[in-house]
Image (spheres, rainbow, N blue to C red):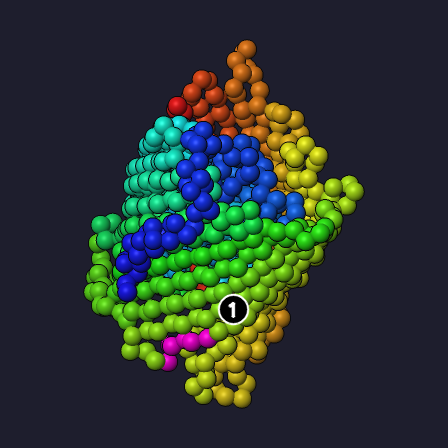
Amino acid sequence: MTTKKILPCAISAITLLWPQFSNSQESATLPAVKVEGQVQTEEKASTPVEGYKANSSFSATKTGTPIVEAQQSISVITKDRIQDKGALTVQDTLGYTAGVSAGSYGFDNRGDWAFIRGTSFVQYQDGLRQLFGFYNNVRPDPFTLERVEVVKGPSSVLYGQGGFGGLVNMVSKRPQGQQAGEVGVQLGEYGRKQLALDLTGPLNEEGTLLYRMIALTRDSDTQVNFVPDDRDLFAPSITWRPNADTSLTAYAQVQRDRTGSSVGFFPIVGTRFEGPNGRIPSDTFISEPGFDLYLAKQTSYGLEFDHRLNDVFTFSQKIKQSDSAVSYNSIYSAFTPAINADGRTINRVAISQYNAADSFTSDSQLIAKWNLGAFENTSIVGLDYQRVALGGARGVGGSAAPIDYLNPVYGNFVAPVLVDIAGTLQRQTGVYAQNQVKYNKRWLGTVGMRRDWAKSETDNAPAARLDTSTNTAKASLGYITNLGAMPYVSYSESFLPIGGLDFFGNPFKPQQAEQIEGGVKYETADGKSLFTAAVYEITESNRRTADPNQAGNQIQVGEAKSKGVELEANHRISPTVDVLAAYAYTTAKVTRDNGANQGKRLATVPKQTLSLWGRQKFSMLGMPGWQWGAGLRFIDESWDGADKVRTPSVALLDAMLSYETGDWRYAVNATNLGDREYVSTCLARGDCFYGVERNVVFSANYNF
């Protein structure tokens, strides 16, 4: 059965099993008044949150746990935070989060880049994995999101492979019981013009059918010459709630992004250091107009089903099918970037790719909430599955003449010819169980375990075959003191399968990571402020390194460690003033290696990050509805992975001014207000990346 047949079959299965799920005939015919308005006293994943502070996280435990009671580090970025910050990308939403260094590779339109606790993150949407492979997907748009949740540390017990440093789960906007609408216009630098629409509400008088429709179109240039940032997006969804115990949501999203080579992979001399003729201008485009392209298209659709079987058990099912493809043409600095002896030209290489991904993901859960004396338990058992087919084509035979970056003249290149590449089929099945317990309203504990089976096959490449299985576990303990603070300790594991064989034909073992974390959380009595602190150590093992006894072989004795301290505050000083503060100190280095990497710091990981954001509501000239905000982001120095090239620290300023009157909201947002030109990172292979320049955007939103 193909993945495209699974969704219709799932709908049929739910229809056939519906009588068995219903508690009784009365449950199926509850009076309409119990559904009308969809009043929700419990915060759910897609419930709108007013202000900067959410009460619960759904990504860390999959059960909806109060953040202050979760025995691990979690940060939730609400829609109000996204709006006030003026975030244009998911990467932007992460900029004021402890332990997260966002925009690691500067201004790069191909994806959202960040490091969590010293390593890149895994991206999820609504609890299902979003990205597979590289450069075959669209970038999620913040306008479609209700919140962004950051789970820090290894998380394989609930999510499977990947995520040594953490994961980012984006929660989509879903249909709501109250009629509401929003039309928004954005105008900004680089000719940015965007129109967005968001409608939601009931479709019938009983309130059992709800809808949401999100649409967006954008035409824009960028800080790099000849590189657009255009987008068209349509995301409808519908929810059926026949009674208070049952919900079925069907959704779809069609998105098309058109951009280009915003990253030139410029050489270290000419960016980080002065070149013969100064530094390469950050707006330099060394690809070719008319040829350069990064065109991403994606269609996804899925179902979310929840049914409360009785007072103890709730069944939940999520399934998603996604088809995406990217046409990628680029010309950039040669593989060892350098300015030529003439002091003006850079050698170039031409590439063409067509990357396609066909993915199906699912997660089935049975949740039980039950008590045993003074023990309050929340248990979950689940089965998740991922299947992704990767394929496409690669360009061969292309070439490009060197280009004068001070006075570029275009047209001297030969486009590569696309040739089909071998397809890869990846599958992962995981079974997991977790129990959360609260004893005597004070003691909190969580234990979980998981078993995964991962397989991968590439056409005509038996040596790349992967067939492995592994176990992961986690455990944590916390205690709520008389002061309301909760100190805790936790242990968690993660794994990443590695395809291929060693010199002797043996398959590689999965790469693994384990974390020990200790921390404390405190929520004020009014529930308006949250303060957290954490210390951690992540040990990453089974890294491949050179075999000292056999040339050409790799053995898995490599190890890396990431240690750090994180402090975060989400504080409401008064009804008109909110402050966000975050600080992280991170050391990440290779602790065991048979080669030159021994003892080297991991690339692109800043030693310290500090951020501070505040907003204040005020009246001006007798008119209420004004609000201003300002923020500081400090990113400390980082290294290239070989401890040879240091990228200096940088401090960036952001600002916001808004005015609300009636149903209208007007705002001006500025990122990197001082227009600081900086290098975000340099790598040992010889290239550097320019950071995001000042961007000022005016927005007008009508809410009805």
Magenta part of the chain: 463-468
Q: Considering depth in this image, is 331 or 520 the residue closer to the camera?
A: 520
Secondary structure beneath label 1? strand
Magenta segment includes 44: no
Q: Mark 1 points at which residue?
A: 451
- Drawn side of residue 128 relative to residue 543, left or right: left
In the rendered view, would you say 624 is above or below 57?
A: above
Picture coordinates of residue 437, whole percent (x, y): 66, 54
Q: How many labels does the image show?
A: 1
Q: In this view, does 534 lie to the left or right of 14?
A: right
Residue 212 found in image quarter: top left
Q: Which of 319 and 71 is in front in this view?
A: 319
Q: In this view, does 77 lie above or below 388?
A: above
Quarter of the picture containing the C terminus is top left
User: Between 615 and 238, which is closer to the camera in this rendering?
Assistant: 238
Q: Position of residue 221 (x, y in %)?
A: 32, 40
Left or right: where 403 falls relative to 173: left
Residue type pointed to by label 1: Arg
Residue 209 at what x, y percent from top left? Answer: 36, 36
Residue lying at 47% horizontally and 65% vertically, measured from the top left: 430
